[in-house]
Amino acid sequence: MVAVAIMALALVAGCVDKEAPRPTGTLNSTYATPVYGYNLVNTYVHDQNAFTQGLVFADGYLYEGTGIYGNSTVRKVELETGEVLKLYSLPDQFFGEGVTLWGNKLIQLTWRSKVGFVYDKDNFSLLTEFAYPTEGWGLTHDGTHLIMSDGTQTLYFLDPDTFEELRRLEVHDKDVPIANLNELEYIQGKIYANVWPTNRIARISPETGQVLGWLDLNGLLREEERSPRCGVLNGIAYDAKHERLFITGKNWPTLFEVAL
């Protein structure tokens, strides 16, 4: 009974009650920020047991970070089949969050523990840990800095070697702050951020924090396929070589390749 209660609390924490303000202004048509649809290019199998918190594509493979206390992992996944080729399980006290690759290192945040982990990309051996003062949500990089979200409207630019905070960026659509910034991906000079718990992704200027456009992904996953445990969109990966954009979500059975 205790175990069931703990799992229920973990699911609520990971999906429903993250302590950040609800998004404001993202659906307000008063603001003339462009809203883009999508074309479905391809679909791939995704592990429906994966509570996806972070996603990145490199060298033909997906690297995925998953959450939930007692079930958080980092994994290397074959794109075409969804097969998990390599997996590392975090200790039970950590709730895994966003991931990114920096050279031969795989970096992962945790939610409320205020600690991140650095792994060897090839064998997933733990290399080091680092600390930060906020919650950890999404993680990406621009080739110079790590970029981290904490569930607010603020993005943090970190030194990728020392993890020292170098600057902050406040994200807004015109004059409306955009909170609940979650999973991140840096694509062609812009920051893409999923706004939890919506099906929208903001395209953000890394210089000004202004939302330049919205990607509306409503309808991508059919409602009957959505997990009752959570099921929100939360996974953005980009194949820069072939200009492919991949999208998935928490406990989604499918990974989608889309074109704007």
Image (tube, grey):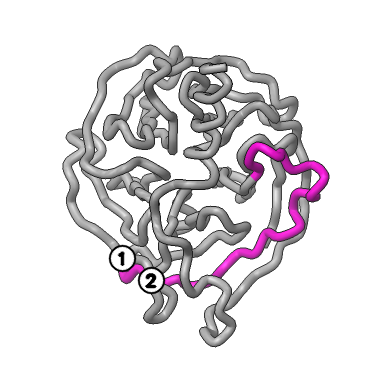
Secondary element type, mark 1: strand
What is the x, y in percent for residue 235?
57, 43
Amino acid tagged 1: Glu
Q: Is residue 129 within the magenta segment?
A: no
- The numbered dot on residue 177 is 2
In depth, the one of 7 and 120 nearer the eye is 7
What is the x, y in percent for residue 21?
41, 60
Which residue carries the number 1 mark? 170
| Residue under the point 32% across and 71% down | 208
Q: Which of the 4 image quarters holds residue 198?
A: bottom right
Magenta residues, start to end: 208-231
| Residue under the point 36% across and 26% down | 105
Please say whether residue 88 is visible from this viewpoint: yes
| Residue under the point 32% across and 55% down | 155
Q: Is residue 217 within the magenta segment?
A: yes
| Residue under the point 41% across and 62% down | 179
Circle 2 Cα neighbour tier, 10 Å, few/some/many (<14 / 14–19 / ≥20): some
What is the x, y in percent for residue 260?
67, 62
Tell whether 93 sits left or right of 76: left
Assess whether mark 2 and mark 1 are in contact (beta carbons under 8 angstroms): yes
